[in-house]
Image (cartoon, rainbow, N blue to C red):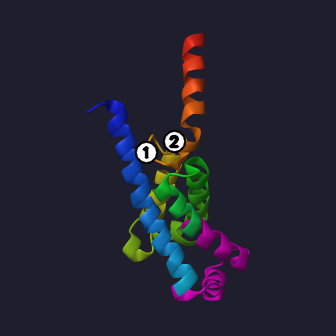
Amino acid sequence: MSTTLVRDLALLLARIGLGIVLVTHGWQKFSDQGLSATAGGFSKMGIPLPTLSAYFATFVELIGGAALIIGFAVPIAGILVALNMAGAFLFVHSGNGVFVNEGGFELVLVIALTGLLLAAFGSGRIGVDALLFGRRRSSADATSHAAS
């Protein structure tokens, strides 16, 4: 198996795994709790602009998670996910230690760092980004290699 194929499969699995986690958390905020209750919870936790933050978190998780699953706009989705988790870390989890069962930051950290990795490396060749932009990137890569 080629290194490129292994990389593409690893990116695919990371995107799908993270996307599933995000979509389920976003759906929980949107459907199970409702945006008003999510905003109320954010307010009690001291998160600034709780209503705006609730909408941001919910839709980054729902739409960003779905985008990661299909491999669309992966760098943008990855950055938004990392920003969302940075907020969760700073305002909720940082003072609680590492372990998630104690309200700690381990899950938030893993989600944020996976989002950053996906932002840096993109969707790989298996995803919508590759279908939409693959040729242009390949041409740019060929041009940069020819110039070196």
Q: Residue placed at 55% from the left, 64% from the top? A: 89
- Closest to the observer: 87 or 25? 25
Q: Amino acid at mark 2?
A: Ala
On the image, numbered disc 2 is attached to which residue? 130
- Numbered circle sitting on residue 135: none
Image x and y of residue 36, in percent: 66, 87
Vertical position of residue 80 compared to residue 60: above or below: above
Mark 2 nearby-residue class (10 Å; few <14, some 14–19, many ≥20): some
Q: Cβ–Cβ below 8 Å for labels 1 and 2? A: yes
Please tell me whether residue 8 belongs to the stretch shown in magenta. no
Q: Residue placed at 30% from the left, 30% from the top? A: 2
Vertical position of residue 20 compared to residue 135: above or below: below
Specify the quadrant that holds the C terminus.
top right
Q: Main secondary structure of the magenta part?
A: helix
Image x and y of residue 125, in percent: 45, 40
- Closest to the observer: 128 or 43? 128
Q: Amino acid at mark 1?
A: Ile
Please tell me whether residue 40 belongs to the stretch shown in magenta. yes
Asked if one can make out residue 71 in the rendered structure from this viewpoint, the answer is: yes
CA gap between label 1 and label 2 equals 7 Å
On the image, numbered disc 1 is attached to which residue? 126
Q: Is residue 123 left or right of residue 9?
A: right
Which segment is the magenta one? 32-61
Image x and y of residue 116, in percent: 53, 49
